[in-house]
Amino acid sequence: MKSFIPQYVDAVCNEIKMVSVSSGQNLKVGTIFFGGGTPSLLSIQQYKQLFETCRNFFDLSLTTEITIEANPGTVNRDYLAGLHDAGINRISFGMQSAHPDDLHILDRQHHHEDVINAVAWSKQAGFNHINLDLIFGIPGQSLERWEETLNLALAENIDHFSLYSLIVEEGTPMHRWVARGLLQGPDDDLAADMYEIAMDRLEQADYLQYEISNWAKRAEDDNRCQHNLQYWRFLPYFGFGAGAHGFVNGIRNENTGAILEYIRKVNQNQQVVFPTGPAGERLDQLSTWDLMQEFLMVGFRLTDEGVSQNVFQTMFGHNLEGAFGKQINYLVKNGLIEPHPQDKTRLRLTRRGRLFGNNVFAQFVGNPPLDSL
């Protein structure tokens, strides 16, 4: 598929142009995020081509956060320097674990030495914002092994961590191994203990848990991932490229995931209707009631900021207690959410609520709509 990369980059640039022109506006964009984990597949020149297109068709500020995901074993010193020179100012590495047994189970090809090198080279290149992704609840992973991973990650002296509990996806080799009894499935109680250890350890190291899976180093500068805050604050975002998702004007869309099909659809140069691009495969117009529920689902992920009753009222013209009083009372009574200690107009997860976040989010799914909607 590497031979199709130049065509693919051209197609992404064309999609950006088509969606921007169809808006009829000079749209402001505050963050750009390149996901996928394999940045070395694209050359520095190809990234410059993408940035130039974004600058030409969107209003980017000088402080725009531009993030790229990377696998630690796929980058080198010169490539990272080139990425930074091209304009990328934040990088996220999939460290996952410091232990080779964990990495083997996860089918990761890198070693912990690769993480150490990648972080060091990133700092030398000028990256001030570096994230490491870690996974806990891996089959066979002990509390001691998890603590070792945390300590080695903290030794890198970076400004951000993302921690995720392992989910065994259907159709994956790990799912088949667990189903056949060849591999022990994740232990939910043990994973909860690991999560609590991480909360305590990162707090001791002066990291703020600002989202259920994300921590930022406390500093005068805001080290939180601004791109992901866009999601959790239920603000609009575009998705460009194969398999990308977007959410604009209450409309969710998803591009076709097949690379060649994506290129073909974009190159047809068909007229597009904002905000859906030429490769849009799904289009969901959410109702006001759906939007209200999703606002609370994503907002309660913000463990420090929580959900603002004032913002809810402004966005939807309804009082939060009036719309979801039953659910709010249940969650408060069970110690899962609380008024924010510095701002009583906000509600946020308690420590217990962080452990049982899915129980909180489930309260805002499938509720019958208000009579007034």
Image (tube, rainbow, N blue to C red):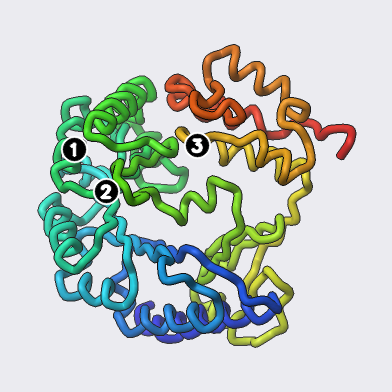
Picture residue at 26% right of the left edge, 35% below the top: 206
Residue located at (49% from left, 49% from top): 229
Task: Using the image, determine if residue 52 lies above or below residue 315.
Answer: below
The disc labelled 1 sits on which kind of residue?
Thr
Q: Residue at x 45, y 19 (%)?
A: 352
Question: In front: 80, or 36?
Answer: 80
Q: Position of residue 201 (x, y in %)?
A: 24, 29
Q: Earlier in the sequence, mark 3 or mark 1?
A: 1
Query: Which structural element holds mark 3?
Result: loop
Q: Which residue is mark 2?
A: 159
In this view, the mark in front (2 or 1): 2
SS at circle 1: helix
Spatial CA distance of label 3 from label 1 is 28 Å
Crowding at label 3, few (<14), some or many (≥20) Cα neighbours within 10 Å? some
The numbered mark at residue 149 is 1
Label annotation for residue 305: 3
Above or below 198: residue 67: below
Q: Locate residue 62, reporting x and y percent.
A: 42, 71
